[in-house]
Amino acid sequence: MRTFTTPMPDLLAQITTAARAYYAQAGRLQLTATDFYSWLDELPLPHRAEVLARGFIASQAEPKFLRACLEWRGYSMRAFMAERLSVAAYELWQRHGEFNGDLPPHAIAR
């Protein structure tokens, strides 16, 4: 019996494309300093100083900040990704801490 699997690069491309589409929704949001400080309060202490030094404007390109803002407004990333990814890509996405494919931190254009 021969088993066909989707090559890893295809799965990563699926994840990257879906993640870009998810974060693109943030472009319709009015992000506020209140959002920023609420998110900051949720971060581990060692990471807070680094994020605070970058500031609110720079954080608007941070996937974790955008996800928090989207989630607070009812845009579930898990549901979004489940609707757009193949089963294999979704499982890979979940197994690796819900990573964003090849999207680097601080690189989401708004």
Image: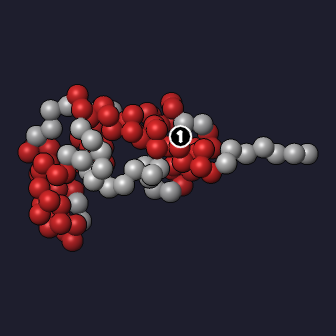
Indicate left or right for 4 with 106 as reference: right
Q: Residue furthest left?
A: 33
Q: Amino acid at mark 1?
A: Gln
Query: In the image, what residue occupies the spot 59% across and 49% down?
Result: 9
Quadrant position of the C terminus in the picture: top left
Judging by the rendered image, the residue that carries numbered circle 1 is 14
**Is residue 105 visible to us here?**
yes
Image position of 104 with respect to 44: above or below: above
- Residue 57 in percent (x, y) is at 12, 48
Query: In the image, what residue occupies the spot 39% across and 39% down?
Result: 20
Q: Quadrant of residue 18?
A: top left
> Judging from the image, what secondary structure is the residue with disc 1 in?
helix
Q: How is the image coloured?
A: secondary structure
Q: Residue furthest right?
A: 1
Q: In the rendered picture of this protein, how many numbered marks are placed on residues? A: 1
Q: Residues within 10 Å of mark 1 (few under 14, many from 20)?
A: many
Query: In the image, what residue occupies the spot 36% across and 55% down?
Result: 104
**Is residue 76 visible to us here?**
no
Q: Quadrant of residue 68?
A: top left
